[in-house]
Amino acid sequence: MAADFDYYKILGIERSATDEEIKSAYRRMAKKYHPDLYSTASEEEKRKAEEQFKKINHAYQVLSDPQKRAMYDKYGSEDGPAFQGGSSGGGFGGFSGGFGGFDDILSSIFSGFGGGTSRSNASAPRKGQDITQSVTLEFKDACFGCEQEIKINRSEGCPDCRGTGAKGGTAYKTCGRCGGRGIVRMSQNTMFGSIVQEVSCPDCRGKGKIITDTCKVCGGKGEIRKVRVVKKRIPAGINHGQIMTYRGEGECGKNGGPNGDLVIMVNVKNHPLFVRKNNFDLYFDVPISFVTAALGGEIWVPTLTDPISFKIPECTQSGTMFKIKGKGVKMLNKDGYGDIYFTVIVQVPSRLSRDQKAQLERFESSLSPSQDEKQRKFKEYTGK
């Protein structure tokens, strides 16, 4: 596929980025544009996010593959150079693409001198692609940790041919054209004369071996598709939007290379009462009566486990926040716990009897200005 955008810019990295930097950038960008995060967005926002997510995945597939990345860096496409016959009005005869394409071709030609041409080894071990999936957790499961079954569809090495594509893993022979090297020397006529380059052997496709009897299970591919359900432990304290990586659970490697990874993006459902802040602190409101606020008293405060008793001091104002230390969410991969912060909200009865109204009127008339300093100052300001 020819690149219609800059893969490095899509992932937000430099062209000199390491494999680890590429993987880290991919996870960051995939998290930002994952379709699950746009479930409540407009159709236009969903469409744009989906298009960007596809670009991010394709860019990662190219840049995480050494062979494709080398092709892309050299030719601007993971498919390699595109030679076209005939004359081009934008450049020299026999070459297309104008001066930019001509410069690329010059670079390609002269890289072959001295036998130092840049080439990829098709038989070299390559790591398998990562698999990215999302899981949705209940609020408390994220706080306490849980075991999650994750269904994945991945490629696995064929057990019958041991990943070789040959029947029994042995039905192949050394390529007679390249002698098992996977590369051959080929001559190309150019405007500068005949140029000899080393290229992948067309007979064995750079593998150095030719299958004599194809494996019937995988059809010579060396791998098969399998739907697996894997059980993974979700650590306590995981939060919405965070990412977990399970090594070796992705697509199978090529030519004996390691498997890719399983990358899990976490979605956590909202709780009807608790709100997480700073990842491990819990915030919520607690309704109390006017009498409890005025006289003080014991209330029961909910936690992630059992409710606990808490003493409200007398004359507590509505909107006052209290803290309970160490009763929040477990800190991810640490021994500590967050705190609980609850705000008391004084409730006004929805209905009052005639006698209750009379009692409240007598109560209010008994108050002195010094007992409600804020109200006194406000009355002074309004003059009423």
Image (cartoon, rainbow, N blue to C red):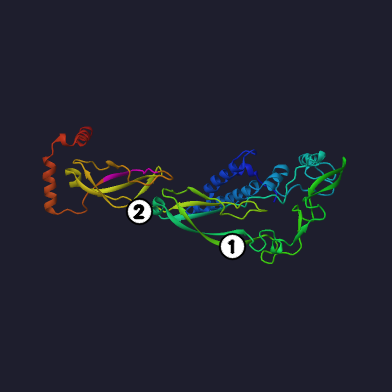
Is residue 384 positioned above or below 330 on the image?
A: above
Asked whether 337 falls inside the magenta stretch, the response is: yes
- Which structural element holds mark 2? loop
Real-space Cα separation, disc 1 to disc 2, in angstroms: 39 Å
Q: Residues within 10 Å of mark 2 (few under 14, many from 20)?
A: few
**At x 38% / y 46%, what residue is drawn?**
330
Picture disc at residue 226 = 1
Picture disc at residue 272 = 2
Sequence order check, earlier mark of 1 and 2 = 1
Q: Nearer the viewer, residue 293 or 133?
A: 133
User: Residue 105 in the image: x percent, y percent?
Assistant: 79, 42
- Which structural element holds mark 1? strand
User: Residue 128 in the image: x percent, y percent?
Assistant: 62, 52
- Give, as a three-letter code, the residue at label 1: Lys
- Give, as a three-letter code, the residue at label 2: Pro
- Residue 224, by quadrant, is bottom right
Specify whether 331 is left or right of 305.
right
Specify whether 271 is left or right of 229.
left
User: Residue 57 in the image: x percent, y percent?
Assistant: 60, 50
Is residue 168 positioned above or below 6 on the image?
A: below
Range of residues picked out in magenta? 335-344
Name the outermost residue toward the right. Answer: 193
**Residue 75 makes an appearance in the image:** yes
**At x 69% / y 67%, what residue is drawn?**
216
| Quadrant showing the C terminus | top left
Q: Residues within 10 Å of mark 1 (few under 14, many from 20)?
A: few
